[in-house]
Image (cartoon, helix red, strand yellow):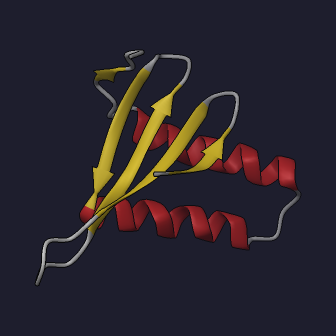
Amino acid sequence: MQTLYNSDSFAVVAFELPAEPGAASRGGYEIVDKFSRKEIFIEGAVAQSFQQGVQALVAQGETEDAVREAVDDYIAGFALLAQQPVMLH
């Protein structure tokens, strides 16, 4: 588990699940919307698309504030799908 992104609005954590012998490793991203207090876990093709989208935004070479705003807007599109309430343990 590794925190990849943390803003006032969102947190993104990467998970890499160990593979069983002979199987490909699995992983994904947990996206937490701090304002709605909901989360979503994405994996597979959706996770790959998410990763590529974020990398493309960062590669644009904008200022840090502009990148953060663009990434927050991008993440918001995925966070709209979040249904799981955030629970504290």
Which residue is painted at 36% across and 60% down in the image? 47
Front residue (pair 53, 22): 22
Give the side of residue 74 with respect to residue 42, left or right.
right
**Residue situated furthest front in the rendering:** 21
| Picture layout, residue 59 above or below residue 27 | below
Q: In which quarter of the image is residue 31?
A: top left
Percent across and percent down for residue 17 are 29, 60
Q: Residue at x 48, y 64 (%)?
A: 51
Residue furthest to the bottom: 22
Residue 20 screen position, x and y as percent: 14, 72
The one nearer the camera, 20 or 14, is 20
Q: Residue at x 25, y 72 (%)?
A: 25
Q: How many marks?
A: 0
Left or right, 58 with reference to 37 = right
Q: Position of residue 74 (x, y in %)?
A: 55, 48
33 or 3, which is in the foreground? 3
Location of residue 84 with respect to 6 vertically, above or below: above
Q: Is residue 14 above or below residue 12?
A: below
Query: Residue 63, image x and y in percent?
Result: 88, 58
Q: In which quarter of the image is the C terminus?
A: top left
Outermost residue toward the right?
A: 63
